[in-house]
Image: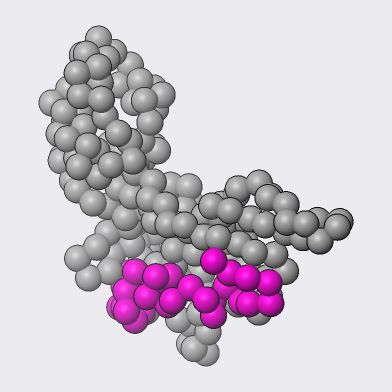
Amino acid sequence: MVKPGEKILDVIPRNEIYKYEKFMDGFVLLKDGSFGVAKLNYNSLFGEMQFIDPKGDTLSLSDEKNISLISIKKDTFYYEDGCIELLANYGKVKLAAKRIFTFSNRTKSGGLNQSGSGEIETYTTYSSRQSFKDITITETLTFSERIIYYFGDRYNHFMAASKKNLYKRYGEHKTRLSKYLDENKINFKDKEDMKMLCSFLQEL
């Protein structure tokens, strides 16, 4: 919970914001075949991969649509509605996930000093705004961690995991897919269920 007068980056611990304890040597491959190396780290508040520039400033990668993949240590990242991390590769099917922070509650002062609940929205509203570190909150915000799963094909085309998107991509297997979903009651927010689903999709 971030209260009025506090700065978000002063309240949420660094180890909750970043995937790695420190910025790590990484490899960025572009779709045109060119590549670059830099000190990289994934920021869950922005939902973006960040790097340290020669001046020592922390910046977000630009031209995301031109990025083929990012490799840090043994981890691989792609871009689909932001930066997503590869969790498993089944050959024809890949499982990936994006960890982000969202507003789970927002309370601001009403006209008579009464608290009023605002709409829940994702943090990515502020994505890429480097000056965000200087923003002081004027209303009480409660942040929650959210993990969104994605399934991809052998060409690294990813879609958010949902029943609608499954039928969209595997429409030619609608009968088998419907039977499987009826029998297994897949939870698209559960990692183990998603692994089981991807194993099934690999067999289609």
Q: Nearer the viewer, residue 59 or 67?
A: 59
- Location of residue 25 by image quarter: bottom left
Give the answer, above or below, for where 20 lies relative to 163: below
Q: Nearer the viewer, residue 157 or 7?
A: 7
Residue found 25% across the figure and 25% down from its top = 185
Residue found 24% across the figure and 63% down from its top = 75
Q: Nearer the viewer, residue 170 or 37?
A: 170
The C terminus sits in image quarter: top left
Q: Is residue 117 left or right of residue 180?
A: right
Magenta segment includes 140: no
Give the answer, above or below, for where 98 lies relative to 181: below
Give the answer, above or below, for where 29 lies relative to 4: above
Q: Nearer the viewer, residue 7 or 168?
A: 7
Region rendered in magenta: 1-27
x, y percentage for residue 77? 33, 57
Q: Is residue 194 left or right of residue 46?
A: left
Magenta segment includes 15: yes
